[in-house]
Image (cartoon, grey):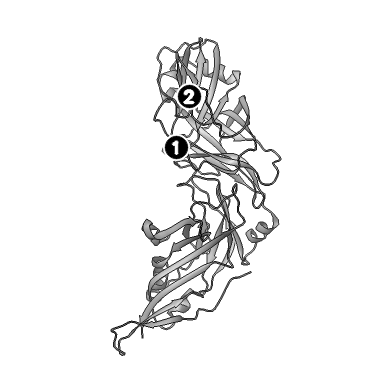
Amino acid sequence: MAISSCTKEEGNIVLDGQGSNNQLGLFLTDTLTFQARTVDEDSLPGNGLRYALLGSMNDGQLGKSTASLYANLVLIEPNSNFPTGETSDSAVLFIPSVDGLNSYGERTTPQLLKIDKLESSISSSNVYYQSNEFEINENYSSVYFGNLINHYTDSIKYRKTKLQPYDGLRIKLSKRMADYLMNMPKEAYQTNENLAKYFKGISIIPQDRDLAPNTGSMAVFDINNIISMAYRAKILLYYQDTNTFVFGFGGSAAAVTTGKTGPYNNLIKEQLNSNAHFDRTYVQALGGVKTKIELPYLFNLIEKGNISINKAEIEFFITDYDENFFAPPRLNLFQPSAKNSVRNYFIPDALNASTYGGLYNSKTRSYRFTITQHLQQLLNEMYFNKKDRNNGLYLAVPTDQPVIGARGIIDHTKTKIKLIYSKPN
């Protein structure tokens, strides 16, 4: 269904102090035609993010989605005389959860995670995407079944002392993995370059389970912070009863969150495979889907001469959410790089963070964006240069700030576009 209306001019105001011969008219319109549909998201960056996502859920509206983590590990305290060949006692993986907004979905559903040895190199100087695939070695697998975020009160053993407990994910790795970490060549424990020859890192992959609708969740973990040995993400290798060797995560640039979404229900499939327009569209994290907004009659505003836009806003209202699958804290508004491209970049209004908008308003249950500069730029290009840059807009869930596995359903029967503009009379 297309949401449309005529572009009539309302609220014509004559500014005080203007003579009748050079009067400047001020106009208000909230009836600008727009059309909306759901489209596939572009490939999104998976590394260099402030935090990492991990988990699996089955959203009753958008179906299944899964976030996996692939991370490079480094030496925290290189050892030139590591006692390789000894028998390991155990190895424990710990990743701290973030405070505050750290979960999306139904949090009480246990997750089945598989931890494997990573065989693909992850370079901190490269950009990886959430659709990337990495080679793993399943000969050293560890399996975990339980909650993604746990409240720990018992401290972690570290040499002859104990580390303060933090909430997050603590997993005892398989004996085979512990023995492998204990028995690499001596050079592996001396430099990160040597370590990468034998141990590039780990993968943590939620396993495909038949989750019931509206169960499962995504959790947010801190793989970047190194404020203390206790808090940082790491693997602790125990040996000779009281000794500990630590492998730390290499930071956000050397860790990749990958995402899988779908299959979608028939309502969403219809939009993805059609050029029709709908009054209910979707946005989703992890490279899932986003909303395309088109303004097909925008240039009607300049049929009788160019205009100056004083203020332009677009407001989106969300529907069908609850305390588990809640409204995303923030959305982004982009402009497509071409008419039919899924690639996009920020509109010029986004450069002014204080007026751009996009934050969720819990009172109005909406997201409001300023699009003044964007629309003025489109009109100027057409009026002065005869170039049609009106490629529409994309509404999407951010990949960062915050990192969250959220989704949103937009009710376009309530979507509002307001323009205040002036033109010589």
Whether 289 is drawn above or below 295: the answer is above
> Could you tell me which quadrant the N terminus lies in?
bottom right
Ranked by sequence position, the earlier of labels 2 and 1 is: 2
Between 399 and 189, the one nearer to me in the picture: 399
Between 275 and 27, the one nearer to me in the picture: 27
Residue 16: in sight, yes or no? yes
- Nearer the observer, disc 2 or disc 1? 1
Q: Residue at x 30, y 90 (%)?
A: 21
User: Dot 2, crowdedness within 10 Å: few (<14), some or many (≥20)?
Assistant: some
> Could you tell me which quadrant the C terminus lies in?
bottom left
Q: Kindly identify the amino acid type of the residue bearing the numbered disc 2.
A: Lys
Whether 250 is drawn above or below 56: the answer is above
User: Dot 1, crowdedness within 10 Å: few (<14), some or many (≥20)?
Assistant: many
Check the image and name the residue furthest to the bottom: 21
| Residue 140 x, y percent position in the rendering | 60, 23
Residue 132: in sight, yes or no? no
How much space separates mark 2 and mark 1, taking CA atoms?
Answer: 21 Å
Residue position marked by numbered label 2 in the rendering:
197
Between 84 and 325, the one nearer to me in the picture: 325
Q: Secondary structure at mark 1?
A: helix
Q: Secondary structure at mark 2?
A: helix
Q: Kindly identify the amino acid type of the residue bearing the numbered disc 1.
A: Ser
Q: Residue at x 59, y 71 (%)?
A: 3
| Residue 145 x, y percent position in the rendering | 64, 30
| Residue 225 x, y percent position in the rendering | 42, 33
Q: Residue at x 52, y 23 (%)?
A: 154
Residue position marked by numbered label 1 in the rendering:
252
